[in-house]
Amino acid sequence: MEYSELLENIVHEIRPYFGRGKVADYIPALANVPPAKFGMAIATIDGAVHTIGEAEEPFSIQSISKAFTLMLAMRLVGDELWTRLGKEPSGSKFNSLVQLEYEEGVPRNPFINAGALVVTDCVMSHCRAPRNAIRDYARVLSRNFAADFDLEVALSERETGFTNAALANLLASHGRLDNPVAAVLDTYFHQCALAMSCADLARAFLPLANRGISPILEEAVLTERQAKRINALMLTCGMYESVGSFAYRVGLPAKSGVGGGIVAVLPGKFCVAVWSPELDRSGNSLVGTAALEALTRLTQLSIF
Ligand SMILES: NC(=O)CC[C@H](N)C(=O)O
């Protein structure tokens, strides 16, 4: 099946799912996004990109940014990162405080908020202008030099991010942050407020499908081992507390964000990004998950 035909079939299949989820409104600026948006982009490892719907429209990537900071931190600090973080699924909400308290400030994994704050802290200790370093890394990987922060979203999150502030303070109280709490939160809120499109994200994640090599840049941005490890972490921790049911339904390593985006990887073949703002109860795109499920069912392709 041609990719264009495949994407049209997926769009047909997901129609019944619209209206069943809820746009994130705990970040006020995200509550204004029209719920019926849908875009999807598949980037194959030869660098070709196939799109449908609003695949070129930038949206708030939110927790998808946690994969960019993890890639940067693995390059900058290597295995030392794992002295500060775990690699296990949390089984809890992405911004849960309880587990962090029990486990003495060592977050379960880099993809829950507490873990991402630690990863961002690591990046900050190794870069002079970390905010821009994270944005520029996303720009280079996606080859979209116009990709930027949505400052309204960053501000909105700063004004209402009480739970994230509590997580950062709890980390600091256990001596787990090297940088000031306010600075870590500011960098974190900005990385979450990066606005990128499905086409940008599908291109940017290609090194994970291609043994660490970006076909866009024609160079290795990660080692093969790092790419394998990040895929393993996405498979086991990338979709919050519904990571198991996502693997069961879709069968691909993936990372989602409360902006309604999901990026998934099929090593050796392609990266796919989907955007639809209505979320399910775990904070994952409801229509986006259905679209990825249709993708792996119609193509009979998954990692399993
Ligand atoms: N799951 C998400 O996408 C969460 C990211 C969001 N910025 C937060 O910290 O709450």
Image: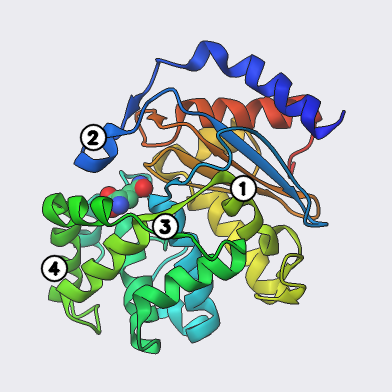
* Residue matched to label 3: 111
Q: Nearer the viewer, mark 2 or mark 3?
A: 2
The kind of secondary structure element at disc 2 is loop
Assess disc 3: are there few (<14), some (14-19) or many (≥20) residues with their C-alpha within 10 Å of its C-alpha: many
Q: Left or right: 183 with respect to 11?
A: left
Q: CA distance from mark 1 to mark 3?
A: 22 Å
- Which residue is pictured at 19% across the width and 61% down the height? 167
User: What kind of residue is marked 1?
Assistant: Ala
The kind of secondary structure element at disc 3 is loop
Marks 3 and 4: CB-CB under 8 Å?
Answer: no
Q: Quadrant of the C terminus?
A: top right
Image: 269 above or below 241: below
Q: CA distance from mark 2 to mark 1?
A: 25 Å
Disc 1 or 3, which lies upstream in sequence?
Answer: 3
Tell me, for residue 48, which label it has, or none: none
* Whole-percent x, y for residue 139 in the image: 53, 66
* Residue matched to label 4: 169
